[in-house]
Amino acid sequence: MAQIFPVVMAGGVGTRFWPLSRERFPKQFLDIVGSGSLLENTISRLLPLADAANTYVVTNRIQSDIVSRQAPLIPKENILVEPFGRNTAPCIGLAASWIRRVDPEALMVVSPADHIIRNTEEFLRILRLALHVAEERDALVTIGIQPTHPATGYGYIQITEEELDRNPYRPQGVYQVKTFAEKPNLETAERFVRSGDFLWNSGIFIWKARTILKEIELHLPDLHEQLVPLQASLGEPNYPQVLEQTYGLIRSISIDYGVMEKAGNAFVVKGEFGWSDVGSWDEVVRQTPIDSDGNSLRGKVIVRNSSNNFIDAREKLVAAIGVEDLIVISTPDAVLICRKGESQEVKEVVDFMRRKQMNDYL
Amino acid sequence: MAQIFPVVMAGGVGTRFWPLSRERFPKQFLDIVGSGSLLENTISRLLPLADAANTYVVTNRIQSDIVSRQAPLIPKENILVEPFGRNTAPCIGLAASWIRRVDPEALMVVSPADHIIRNTEEFLRILRLALHVAEERDALVTIGIQPTHPATGYGYIQITEEELDRNPYRPQGVYQVKTFAEKPNLETAERFVRSGDFLWNSGIFIWKARTILKEIELHLPDLHEQLVPLQASLGEPNYPQVLEQTYGLIRSISIDYGVMEKAGNAFVVKGEFGWSDVGSWDEVVRQTPIDSDGNSLRGKVIVRNSSNNFIDAREKLVAAIGVEDLIVISTPDAVLICRKGESQEVKEVVDFMRRKQMNDYL
């Protein structure tokens, strides 16, 4: 098999983990589950497939220092800094350009930096299958997660039933992509899950660098045209200027809609490996072990007559008396106290603070 | 009328207002209700009766600096520092000794530093009546609070029904003391309140300095014997040593049981002036105005879908989402989250931290 190059996309700017996450310190850099940051975990998880020297991280200017600090094994030149966020297609085009330059046959594993995966062994098994399909068929492959409930916080991928009989990978859970669907409402999500041909969109992609660049040329010709001069500048003194110019001209578009949905050779490998994109504190709560009182306690916490609470007090002591079903996040300058099931409202609190220009807390 | 000398007893070391109160910064120094500390309020409340130069504060070594800071109008020599806490009888004996030296006919108004009184006008009216009784009859007078509910957190004073007919002050609500009762259980408290002859013990006393010293001589002869050399040392260079020796020998005893209960000339003036000794966060909650959602919010607080909460976030931002009936106290290093009605458990939390030697938080 060709060399494998993990690409970790770490440019997210989520607000849903306030007060632990901040504008300058978003979710992927947080140690949400207590075993290193999500970025650190994402990089480590992929190390059995490829050397750290082959691993790339795409990030932005504000976060590149945090990335360097959290990923000391990654060569500095492998940390790619986008001047502006332009969604996943340009990000992937940039990384693929660098990687193809190193190895024209390179296989890429593209992964968001901010997911939780509990069963790493199974995840790697699925990835190896996907790499096999990508290499053998010059295909674009993504991982679809077998839904466990009608989640409204995830995008979905519809797989093509008609093609399945002619699909030699069927027994291994490999399907063709039909469409991508944005986060649905509950009714739609229930229909998706009932239908059996929708999987959660993991945002994980596997392909050869040259294959994805070819498909970008086919389906996103304007992005391709911007990438050509950028590719010529890689490693040259004018690279920073060209990068800046390129990103100034590129439109935002996702690789899902821009390429995967249109490509004839797009496959989905179905996986079940304890995946979560941990989109809210409630999701973290679901991923966290509880004690005999149903509490998940972290840091300096004292509880009395209290049950089913998630309390993260790494930064200052929290004493809870007689309370239930709360999510409490204590940081040096702010405390969140949220009823379980209502953590989607955190976003509204952050929006409120933004409107009020409470910049110290953003 | 003779000169009046307010004496504020500010040596308390309560733990019930953790995390706002700490061992070195107890309740009386806190701005619990948002209009200055309880000590500051206590001193100001008595200023219509007497000059600041006549006001004394009795405190301890640890707290004397805080007292000086919070009571800048009080002459430094009027801040009396007890080497050890020995309950109220020695404290009052010390203050009376100093005050009698200034004015042999002096009237004292002794008050704890940590109460809330909402109706200052009525409070002063009651005090003036008490001062009148104290002066005219050379009496020991205390203020009994008309109970509004069978509180278990207060001591009670039983008034003597038999004496009432012969009492010329009856129409004005002046009675004789029968006994003092410690904090009762609920059943006893209900019986007390039903009986009609029990009042809440405010811990406020009015008497001439020489009268209380004479009664101490009668009923606490051992304390009297210790006070005699101390009185000889007042203003002398050996005062600190004599004070230290005296307090080393004195036993702890309250003025209620040591003197008031035994004295033949002890009276109770009944008062209703919005008094509370604010013994718990729940009591503070009851004393605090609420907004249209039933919330009392102080400091940097953001609430969504939340009602009937008391949130004090003077020291760091608190965001509350979907929560009800909580008491939240946010300080620089600790946060309390307590179900309303359970704030008596705060003491247990502090005891726990003491056992665990979490001294930074005590």
Image (cartoon, coloured by chain):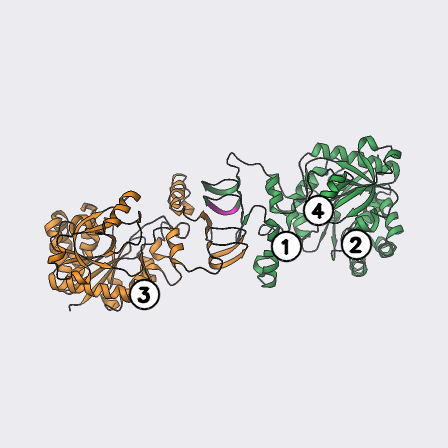
Chain colours: A green, B orange
Front residue (pair A152, B320): A152
Q: For the residues carrying marks 3 and 2, which lies nearer the camera in this image?
A: 2
Of mark 2 and mark 4, the one earlier in the sequence is 4
Chain at numbered mark 1: A
* Residue A187, numbered label: 4
Residue hosting label 2:
A253
Q: For the residue marked with disc 4, what is the amino acid? A: Glu
Residue wearing tag 3: B72
State whether residue B314 is above or below residue B87. below
Q: How many badges with numbers are in the image?
A: 4
Q: CA distance from mark 3 to mark 4?
A: 67 Å
- Expressed as whole percent of the image width and height from the top left, the position of residue B29 reads 35, 57
Q: Chain of mark 4?
A: A
Q: Which residues are magenta?
A: A314-319
Whether callout 1 and callout 2 share a subunit is answered yes
User: Are the residues flagged by discs 4 and 1 in contact, CB closer than 8 Å?
Assistant: no
Label 3 resides on the chain identified as B
Task: Please tell me whether mark 3 sits on a helix, a strand or a loop.
Answer: loop
Image coordinates of residue B103 in percent, x first then y, are 15, 65
For residue A39, which quarter of the picture? Answer: top right
x, y percentage for residue B181?
22, 47
Image point 65% across, 50% down: which residue? A66
Q: Is residue B234 visible?
A: no
Quadrant in the rendering for residue B172: bottom left
